[in-house]
Image: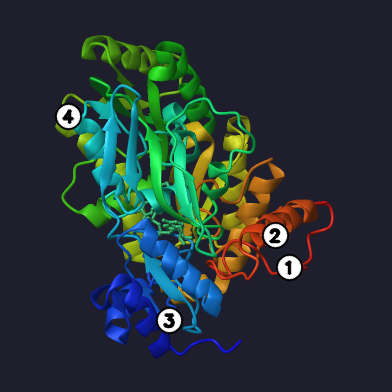
Amino acid sequence: MNTPTSEAIVASLSAIVGSQTCLGTEAEIKPFVTDYRGLYVGQAAAVVLPSSTEQVSQVMAWCHENGVAVVPQGGNTSLMGGAVPGADGAAIVLNLRRMNQVLAVDPINDTMTLQAGVTLNAARTAAEDAARLFPLRIGSEGSCQIGGNIATNAGGTAVLRYGNMRDLVLGVEAVLPDGRIYSGLRGLRKDNTGYDLKQLFVGSEGTLGIVTAAVLKLMPLPRTSSVALAAVPDPAAAVALLGEAKKAAGQMVTAFELISGPALELVLEYLGNVRPPLEGRHDWMVLIELTSGGSSESLDQSLMQALESGMESGLVLDAALAQSVADAQSFWRIREEISDAQTRTGGSIKCDVSVPLSCIAGFIEEASAAVRALEPQARMIVYGHMGDGNVHFNPLRPKDRTAKEFLGACYDKVSHAVDSLAHAAGGSISAEHGIGVAKRDDLTQYKSAVELELMWQVKKALDPKNLLNPGKVLPAPGAASTPGNE
Ligand SMILES: Cc1cc2nc3c(=O)[nH]c(=O)nc-3n(C[C@H](O)[C@H](O)[C@H](O)COP(=O)(O)OP(=O)(O)OC[C@H]3O[C@@H](n4cnc5c(N)ncnc54)[C@H](O)[C@@H]3O)c2cc1C
């Protein structure tokens, strides 16, 4: 079959979504084909911005019939190059941002139904307006969309208490690669009627279907929170302190984030004019947040109890308890800006790994030693959702080397060393950011042949022509798996 020209694609898709929302010029297309960090720059035959599930279905049916590949895109905040097309310009980008309606909030069923293009921020606000919490919390929440959060199974800083996106989704509506609509918009907490098909789309990174709407779980809105930043001697002490916090506050422990000294230094340099909450320099810190529906005094007491017991046993070197909402926000700002501080600096090797919590301290020690052996001057930007066993282990270029020089010299070696240590500790090479193109080929080393075969079988069942986000997540069929992984 001859694939249609760009002009023919634009003309046909304009007839479906309208000419104003089918973009075809280079200037119009450019922002949609460059990823958040500017590392992946592709090309597209067109960018379509549909406004309804029906339009998405018609676009997909046309593309399926004409052999045109489609890259689904939400807020384009993927850190793995997952939401931008390849360089050949053959695919179109289908961006969901016009499908941004909150369709219903049901405070009795504790659910919210929304179109996929609603930003995470807007979803959280809609829940709060009904005195409920939608608990997903990630640094990109102003731009990322619910459809993207589902497609990446997003995690973030409140997974410890509420789970990741997979745990928060009750229903999904998705358009399949041939244009058929899977209507699973049910708000049921119990539904054992066969395979749980909606979960196929969670974490599929736009390779199986286009998520067009979802039903999400809502939680009681906490009335109070208590936040502290504590310096600890090392990651092992941080893990032990998490145990103390759980002992003192049980499931009120909502976030437990690790921050390395170099990560704090980088973010303070990036933000300028911000006073660090703790005196002096520390190699390791943790940001702890408790939340509850009870009184703020008892919550503060629980946190103080954990910190005091930590101080007595040498797990805590120093600590600052936020005295106000503004204090808490300033502690959190430091944590949340680490990602952007690295993007601004350039030259960071992003390893988003998870290991069992019991192995995390050993893993950090071994990975740090391995990176130092390869790149003694690399800045160790190590931080993340320690409570979930998830570390962003991101060695950063030394100040006297350019990003290009540093990444060119050691990107593959460093990321392989970190990933293989995580794998050896029973962990994952992608805890929450997904695979995209960035880690696609590495999968052959860390997934068994059976796992890869099953993934391809699912892909082929839903997308036999391989037109939906081709080249993402799945390594080329037949690529060898590492012996020992069988
Ligand atoms: C500053 C910053 C902080 C971040 N912090 C976190 C964090 O703490 N935890 C975390 O998990 N992630 C984090 N991320 C990564 C990113 O924000 C998440 O992966 C997010 O869920 C992506 O949503 P998006 O709408 O931007 O999706 P995009 O980037 O547009 O797309 C991501 C993937 O999903 C697919 N996709 C998008 N929309 C749809 C749809 N409607 N249907 C089907 N497929 C779709 C795309 O094809 C692509 O493969 C962070 C990113 C940044 C820039």
Query: Where is mark 2, residue-wise?
Result: 456
Give ligand 1's quarter of the image: bottom left
Marks 3 and 1: CB-CB under 8 Å?
Answer: no
How far apart are the two marked residues, 1 and 2, measured between alpha carbons? 8 Å
Q: CB at mark 4 closer than 8 A to ligand 1?
A: no
Q: Amino acid at mark 3?
A: Gln
The residue at which mark 4 appears reads as 325
Kind of element beneath mark 2:
helix
Of the image marks 3 and 4, the number of the one nearer the N terminus: 3
Residue 465 image position (x, y, % from top left): 63, 71
Spot occupied by residue 460 in the image (x, y as percentages of width and height): 67, 62
Which of the two discs, 4 and 1, labels the residue nearer the N terminus? 4
Look at 83% across and 51% down and name the residue there: 486
Tag shown at residue 43: 3
Return the x and y of residue 387 as percentages of the image width and height: 48, 31
Tell me which corner region of the image, top left, top right, bottom left or bottom right, holds residue 480: bottom right
**In this rendering, is residue 101 above or below 175?**
above
- Label 4, residues with CA under 10 Å away: few <14, some 14-19, many ≥20: few
Say which quarter of the image contains residue 102: top left
Q: CA distance from mark 4 to mark 2?
A: 48 Å
The span from disc 3 to disc 1 (Cα, nearest Å) is 24 Å
C-alpha span from label 3 to label 2: 26 Å
Mark pair 3, 4: CA separation: 45 Å
The reply to whether dot 3 and dot 2 touch (C-beta < 8 Å) is no
Write down the residue under mark 1.
477
**Disc 4 or 2, which lies upstream in sequence?**
4
